[in-house]
Amino acid sequence: MSIPTVGSGSSPVRPRQAVLLLFGVLLAAALLSGGCAGKNPYPTGSFERAVFFAEQGKDLEAVGAFESFVRHNPTDSLAAEAQYRKAMVYMETHEYPLAAVEFQILRKDYPTSPLVEDALFEEGKAYLFQVGRVERDLTGAYEARLHFLNFSQEYPGSEHMDEVVGYMQDISDLMVRKRLEQVKVYGQLKRYSAVALVLDDVLREEAGSSLIPRVMWERALAAERLDDPDTAADMYEKLIQQYPDSEYRQWAAEALRKLDEQDSDDSDT
């Protein structure tokens, strides 16, 4: 092979040109690799592909990939986890009805999976989180309550129990707020017997609510309006004894004092 010389048909590649050429090749390679960085490097249908999408925040792609993995690998050791992760993507995107269904599928198709406990817990949250403001339908809250009660019976020693207790109180508070809206309407209509009936139901059914002091206060006021001082006094006394830190305690003590004075005056006459 002859070496090119000055005046021959081909020109030699100068050192500077070679450096520029190499730089161009490296730049093109860098741009190409940068453009592929956001692409999923894992094969279609693999568990890793679904996880990659989920970690990248590509929720729709993650759901599709997890579903594809479970459908094609229903007996794989990672199938239950894929089903759980799919449901959790729905939770993170606030698609709570869809999440509840996916958790149900996991419990049905993989009953021996260690993820069943977490799935049962998360399913209860999905029902609860469907509930919006007080004015909306509380069906989800009722479902969540029954679900958490079932969870408490099946997993009494679960690490989730503290959260379950908290959610149960939230549900109870939600129920009470709904009933207090009814009480407000009845009060405006001066239907105090209806007010008393509703509040008695609340005291019987929602004892775990943090709003019970308010309910007792309202019930005592209703009793006074119904000219039933004995019930009013009994309610004030219970409020004072059972909820000493409540903001209603001082008001109840003052109201009870007035009832006692009134009773004393009546006795004198």
Image: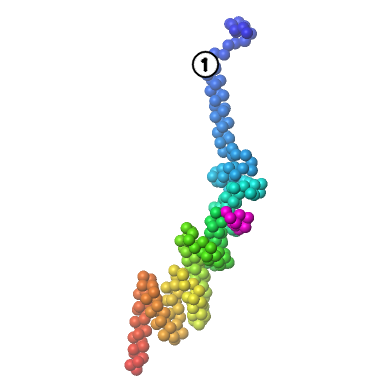
Q: Quadrant of the C terminus?
A: bottom left
Rendering coords of residue 202 (x, y %): 49, 75
Q: Quadrant of the N terminus?
A: top right
- The residue depicted at 58 percent of the width and 42 percent of the height is 48
Q: Quadrant of residue 236?
A: bottom left
Which secondary structure type mostly characterizes the magenta part of the structure? helix
- The residue depicted at 52 percent of the width and 74 percent of the height is 182
Q: Is any atom of residue 60 visible in this view?
A: no
Rendering coords of residue 113 (x, y %): 57, 54
Q: Is residue 106 magenta?
A: yes
Extreme-front residue of the structure: 112
Front position in the image: 142 or 110: 110
- The residue depicted at 49 percent of the width and 76 percent of the height is 204
Extreme-right residue of the structure: 72
The image shows residue 58, relative to residue 141, as above or below, that is above
Q: Is residue 228 magenta?
A: no
Which residue is identified by label 1?
Answer: 16
- Which residues make up the magenta segment? 103-113
Q: Quadrant of residue 111?
A: bottom right
Amino acid of disc 1: Arg
Rendering coords of residue 70 (x, y %): 63, 49
